[in-house]
Image: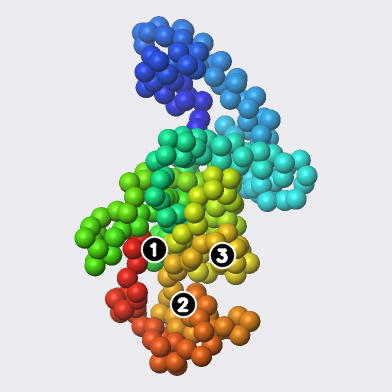
């Protein structure tokens, strides 16, 4: 968040108790000089904070030449020890902020009865700034931003990609007296968030967020993911997710359905391991089916 919008939130959007907790002075909206002085203090604090965390400190108030912007972007990808430490520290701060609500809900017993089902998705976070300009030879103020393309979309969104974990709801099956109702009344909170450049570390970011939930002792249930995750290599997503105990619910393109290979003698069918002696007709039941047909005959899931 930039300093000036932050000042507006601190001065105008927070209620008096929240301002008292944070030590924010009660400044009248007509006291222009006091508001400017407060914004300058916030700006200086923000500048010190970003200087301590930024892997590659630069002037972010102007658009850098493309060559300089490329150096900034590269600093978020290289293996320099100090830059790696700062990137990990930024992610740790993000993890702690996101998990505050999860920790409070867990302490108050709101996750009682939750089966541990989770939905994982990578969604676009648009940037406030313009993309790089080849005509002017300048980069974006958001040096690490890029183009995020959602599944099936031909138009990208310039910004970042956010990997989100959400507590999913399992519902009673049709044969149950409470058919269709949620099994537990847990809050469908965001359980994890990792912000990254589009197309980078899609699988590993999801695994990182899942690992942050291990200390809570939550059950590992179904893990539903879209095609961005079925495209990941086994070691980047499927294998570590299964090691954490999750049962994957995956979606595949038409040409990837059915028998996909073998693993230590077991058949790999639609992302799940099956008995090598499964009848051929059953193993190839989804081969070549389009989305509507495949989802129509697939076993009914109880997770939203």
Q: Label 2, on which residue?
A: 270
Asked whether the residues under the numbered discs 1 and 2 touch, taking CB atoms below 8 Å apart as contact, a structural biologist would say no
Mark 1 and mark 2: Cα distance apart in space: 24 Å
Residue 287 appears in the picture as rendered: yes
Please say if 289 is above or below 192: below
**What element does badge 1 sit on?**
loop
Residue 128's place in the image compared with 238, above or below, is above
Q: Residues within 10 Å of mark 1 (few under 14, many from 20)?
A: few
User: Closer to the camera, 209 or 31?
Assistant: 209
Mark before the other along the chain sequence, 1 or 3: 1
Q: Secondary structure at mark 2?
A: loop
Q: Which quadrant, please, contains the C terminus?
A: bottom left
Residue 74 image label: none
Distance (Cα) linking label 2 and label 3: 15 Å
Density class for disc 3 (Cα within 10 Å; few <14, some 14-19, many ≥20) is few
Instruction: Give the foreground label among 1 and 3.
Output: 3
In the image as oriented, which residue stretches furthest toward the bottom? 280
SS for callout 3 = helix
Where residue 242 is drawn, which disc sits there? 3
Residue drawn where x is 60% and y is 70% of the image: 234
Is residue 184 shown left or right of residue 237?
left
| Percent position of residue 143, x then y | 59, 44
Closer to the camera, 122 or 149? 122
Tell me the CA gap for discs 1 and 3.
Answer: 30 Å
- Residue 169 located left or right of residue 54: left
Q: Is residue 177 above or below residue 135?
A: below
Q: How is the image coloured?
A: rainbow
Q: Horizontal and vertical percent for residue 189?
A: 41, 44
- Mark 1, residue position: 153
């Amino acid at each position: 968040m930039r300093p000036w919008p932050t000042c507006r939130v601190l001065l105008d959007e927070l209620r008096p108790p929240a301002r008292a907790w944070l030590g924010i002075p009660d400044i009248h909206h007509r006291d222009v000089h006091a508001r400017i002085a407060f914004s300058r203090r916030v700006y200086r604090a923000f500048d010190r904070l970003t200087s301590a965390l930024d892997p590659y400190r630069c002037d972010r108030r102007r658009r850098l030449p493309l060559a300089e912007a490329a150096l900034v972007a590269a600093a978020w990808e290289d293996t320099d020890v100090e830059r790696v430490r700062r990137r990990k520290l930024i992610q740790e701060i993000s993890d702690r902020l996101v998990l505050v609500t999860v920790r409070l809900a867990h302490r108050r017993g709101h996750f009682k009865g939750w089966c541990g089902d989770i939905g994982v998705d990578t969604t676009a976070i648009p940037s406030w700034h313009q993309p790089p300009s080849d005509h002017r030879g300048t980069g974006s103020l958001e040096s690490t931003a890029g183009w995020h393309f959602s599944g099936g979309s031909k138009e990208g969104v310039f910004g970042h990609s956010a990997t989100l974990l959400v507590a999913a709801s399992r519902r009673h099956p049709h044969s149950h007296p409470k058919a269709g109702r949620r099994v537990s009344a847990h809050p469908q909170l965001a359980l994890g968030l990792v912000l990254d450049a589009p197309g980078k570390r899609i699988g590993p970011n999801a695994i990182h967020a899942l690992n942050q939930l291990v200390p809570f002792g939550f059950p590992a249930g179904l893990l539903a993911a879209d095609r961005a995750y079925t495209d990941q290599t086994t070691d980047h997503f499927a294998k570590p997710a299964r090691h954490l105990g999750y049962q994957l619910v995956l979606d595949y393109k038409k040409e990837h359905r059915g028998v996909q290979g073998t693993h230590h003698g077991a058949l790999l069918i639609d992302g799940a391991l099956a008995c090598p002696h499964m009848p051929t007709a059953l193993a190839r039941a989804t081969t070549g089916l389009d989305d509507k047909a495949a989802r129509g005959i697939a076993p009914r899931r109880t997770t939203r």
